[in-house]
Image (cartoon, helix red, strand yellow):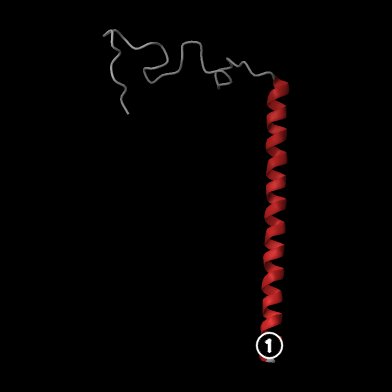
Amino acid sequence: MDHPPPPHGGPPPDGFDGGPPPGGVPGGPNDNTTVPPELRLLGAGSYLVFTLLSLTANFLLLTVFIKVIHFLCLLKYSILGS
């Protein structure tokens, strides 16, 4: 999507012409980072904890789903008599 030209007719300010800002992107791949390593480790740790919690929740939901299906099958056989 193209940006409209600036009202003063001059070139757009740095960072708005489709490229990165002149000082680099904070935390970007060009080693111009402003994020301390402790915060990076904290972010990675919280992502790992979130992933493990999500996997645990999915496993528990799958277990409950299987138990419900099993219960419905037992109920069906008890009502119909096999």
Tag 1's secondary structure? helix
- Residue at the (56%, 18%) spot, across then down: 26
In the displayed structure, does residue 78 sit left or right of residue 8? Answer: right
Q: Position of residue 7 (x, y in %)?
A: 28, 11
Quadrant in which the C terminus appears: bottom right
Few, some or many C-alpha atoms within 10 Å of disc 1 (few <14, some 14-19, many ≥20)? few
Q: Position of residue 54 (x, y in %)?
A: 68, 48
Quadrant in which the N terminus appears: top left
Q: Is residue 61 above or below residue 76?
A: above
Tag 1: amino acid: Ile
- Residue at the (57%, 14%) spot, across then down: 32
Q: Is residue 25 above or below residue 80?
A: above
**In this view of the protein, which residue sits in the foreground, 64 or 30?**
64
Res 5 → quadrant: top left
- Residue at the (72%, 46%) spot, across then down: 53
In the displayed structure, does residue 15 sit left or right of residue 39? Answer: left
Q: Position of residue 49 (x, y in %)?
A: 73, 40
In the picture of the structure, the residue carrying the numbered disc 1 is: 79
**In this view of the protein, which residue sits in the foreground, 28 or 78?**
78
Question: What is the residue that sits farthest to the bottom in this orientation?
Answer: 81
Question: What is the residue that sits farthest to the front in this orientation?
Answer: 79
In the displayed structure, does residue 30 sit left or right of residue 44? Answer: left
Res 79 → quadrant: bottom right
**In this view of the protein, which residue sits in the foreground, 8 or 40?**
8
Res 61 → quadrant: bottom right
- Residue at the (46%, 11%) spot, across then down: 22
Q: Position of residue 74 (x, y in %)?
A: 71, 81
